[in-house]
Image (cartoon, rainbow, N blue to C red):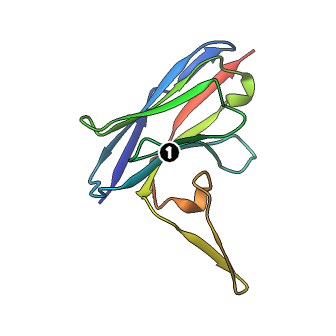
Amino acid sequence: QVQLVESGGGSVQAGGSLRLSCAASGYRYESYLMGWFRQAPGKEREGVAVIDSDGTTKYADSVKDRFSISIDNAKNTLYLQMNSLKPEDTAMYYCAADSLGIRTHCSGGNCRKLDVLEVARFEFWGQGTQVAVSS
């Protein structure tokens, strides 16, 4: 059973920094995809940043040049370094994991490849850690 436990959330002022951590256990994929998502009140969950076992990363446009995703394989821990935080970064932040590979979504007979920043791409989720940024 895959378990993901986030930590590191908190309250900061705009311009500040936080580092989120996600401790993973029960993970047996040799090739993996892990990521951070967030959900603000009244909004849908959205992808923030992902990293795969090859070290390839992808970021949402809204966090590029401010956030950095990394992974420590020895500690089985995923990180998200968040700098220059803005009030609009306020949200519950979730860690997600899945095996690397193509996953598709089919509807009405049409199938498409799921992007790595899409919520539906991931099978395993943590409980979340809250980030609040005040102006």
Total marks drawn?
1
Q: Quadrant of the N terminus?
A: bottom left
Residue 84, above or below 89: above
The relative height of residue 101 versus residue 53 in the rendered view (above or below) is below
Instruction: State which quadrant residue 13 falls in.
Output: top right
For residue 135, side relative to residue 122 (left or right): right
The residue drawn where x is 65% and y is 78% is 106
Q: Residue 97 or 93: which is nearer the viewer? A: 97
Residue drawn where x is 73% and y is 85% of the image: 108
The answer to whether residue 106 is left or right of residue 1 is right
Taking 125 as reference, is 39 above or below it?
above
- Residue 76, quarter of the rendered image: top left
Q: Say left or right for 47 vs 5.
A: right
Task: Indicate the amino acid at tag 1.
Answer: Gly
Indicate left or right for 13 with 102 as reference: right
Corner quadrant of residue 105: bottom right
The answer to whether residue 95 shows anywhere in this view is no
Helix, strand or loop at disc 1? strand
What residue sits right under mark 1 in the picture? 35
Q: Position of residue 62 (x, y in %)?
A: 72, 34
**Residue 11 drawn at (x, y percent):** 59, 19
Q: Position of residue 123 (x, y in %)?
A: 47, 62
Q: Which quarter of the rendering shows the C terminus?
A: top right
Reply above or below: 58 against 112: above
Q: How many neighbours does mark 1 have within 10 angstroms: few (below 14), some (14-19), or many (20 or more)?
A: many
Q: Residue at x 40, y 46 (%)?
A: 54
Instruction: Say if residue 76 shows up in the picture.
Output: yes
* Image coordinates for residue 28, horizontal then vertical, percent: 26, 57
Q: Give whichever of 117, 9 is nearer the camera.
A: 117
Instruction: Please tell me which residue is depicted at 43% across the width and 41% down the height of the picture.
Output: 55
